[in-house]
Image (cartoon, rainbow, N blue to C red):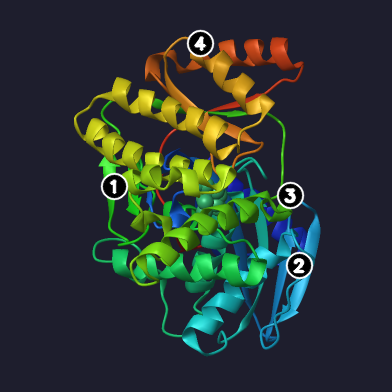
Amino acid sequence: MTPAELEAAAARAFASEYGGRARIAARAPGRVELLGNHTDYNGGLVMAAAIDRHTAVVGRVWTEREGRVYAANFEGSARFPLAAIERGPVGTWPNYAKGVVWALQEALGVELTAGFEATIAGEVPLGAGLSSSASLQAAFAFFLLQAGVVPGGTVEQYVGEGSDAALMDLAMVLRRSENAFVGVSSGLLDQFSSLFGRADHALFLDCQSLEFARVPLGAPGPAIVVCDSKTSRKLADGMYNRRFAECNAVVDHFKARKGEDAVRLLRDVSLDELEDAWNDLDPTCRKRARHVLTENRRVEEGVAALRAGDLKRFGALISASHASSRDDFENSSAALDALIEVAEGAPGFLGGKLSGAGWAGCTVNLVEADEAEEFAEAVRHGYFRRQGVAPAVHVCRAADGASGRMLNG
Ligand code: GLA
């Protein structure tokens, strides 16, 4: 489906839910994480790409000071007063929409200038490690900006030349929405990727300094092939926050040794320091930290490899990242490992790893562009033979970030 078709589907759902026409449309892409797994909330380095699978939000301004949202994928709706936004049950989609309004209002210190009626439609697989939730947040924020209900805010401030600083501020507002409202201790990666994406480019982010770069994937670039294991989980199910705590246990150890000011995040600890302290550290937590710190290194090498046009090296780093997730961070699963092992023997494979939080969902593979279809076929058959489940395989391209527009008519 093209983004325009997705918006059209959302507009039809809007008309049948609310009556009348949607006037405003916004969209934002999902993302794959290429390198730098679980580094973001540790102040580390990460590489990602926005992909051409989107969430669309369409709708119109409404006279009541209330948000009304219908989610076509779930056939469910939510209503909430702008003046008193309350979080619903953990893990339910309305929290993501409400959270965006809550965080924008909190950042600005004022309410939105009007309410709205909106419909969401998405084609980013849910709970699969492709950031369907961040694409919803980013599309929703652009919908509100395009609707003109954000005091002092317009879409123009966030697109085109000179807009990156504002876009980074917005990414942080959306992260706060996920941390403080939805209740997931996630880092900046997903919101950053959905907002900053660029066609045919990978994205680099230093989560401590917020330095970032859009790095060309080459011409012709490799295919980004996402393989969905058809196993799923919810981010709020506890494993993610447990890893966050395990990383922080190592930070606490170094704080006690080096002082509170010297170490705030795992990024402030070097691999050498970790190795020196190895025997004093909890056996589980030290492996988590080794994963994060070796990932930072792989990102540095990955950016250099991509800039040098060395896709083989870049792919090898991606595969090394998966091994580190599997062995040290223990956020892979039998299904994800099987998917990677099958991919390794498929035509055109350059490298592959789990994408995002882990434990279930998708792998992301870098594949020679002209072999992407053969690769996809081989993975479909190989995974089915091993697991007895047909995976969904998506051949993707790196895509542009969030955008908004008025609908004609
Ligand atoms: C999820 C989170 C991100 C990031 C990844 C793991 O996708 O939302 O912030 O932590 O997991 O790298």
- Please give the residue where the numbered disc 1 appears in the rendered image: 214
Tell me if mark 4 has few (under 14), some (14-19) or many (20+) residues whose alpha carbon lies within 10 angstroms of its own.
many
Q: Earlier in the sequence, mark 4 or mark 3?
A: 3
Mark 2 near mark 1, Cβ–Cβ under 8 Å? Answer: no
Which residue in the structure is indicated by mark 4?
346
- Ligand 1 within 8 Å of disc 3? The answer is no
User: Which residue lies at the image location 27% right of the left edge and 50% below the top edge?
Assistant: 213
Residue 18's label in the rendered image is 2
Give whichever of discs 2 and 1 has the lower sequence position: 2
Residue 361 percent across, percent down from the top left: 65, 36
The image quadrant that residue 385 belongs to is: top right
Residues at marks 4 and 3 touching, judged by CB atoms closer than 8 Å = no
Name of the residue lying farthest toward the front: 279
- Residue 9's tag is none
- Quick one: SS at disc 1? strand
Q: Residues within 10 Å of mark 2 (few under 14, many from 20)?
A: some
Task: Give the farthest residue toward the left.
Answer: 308
**Comparing labels 3 and 1, the label whose residue is closer to the camera:** 1
CA gap between label 3 and label 2 equals: 16 Å
- Whether 241 is drawn above or below 179: the answer is above
Classify the position of the N terminus by image quarter.
Answer: top right
Answer yes or no: is residue 382 visible: yes
Residue 194 position in % (x across, y down): 46, 53
Amino acid type assigned to the residue bearing label 4 in the image:
Ala
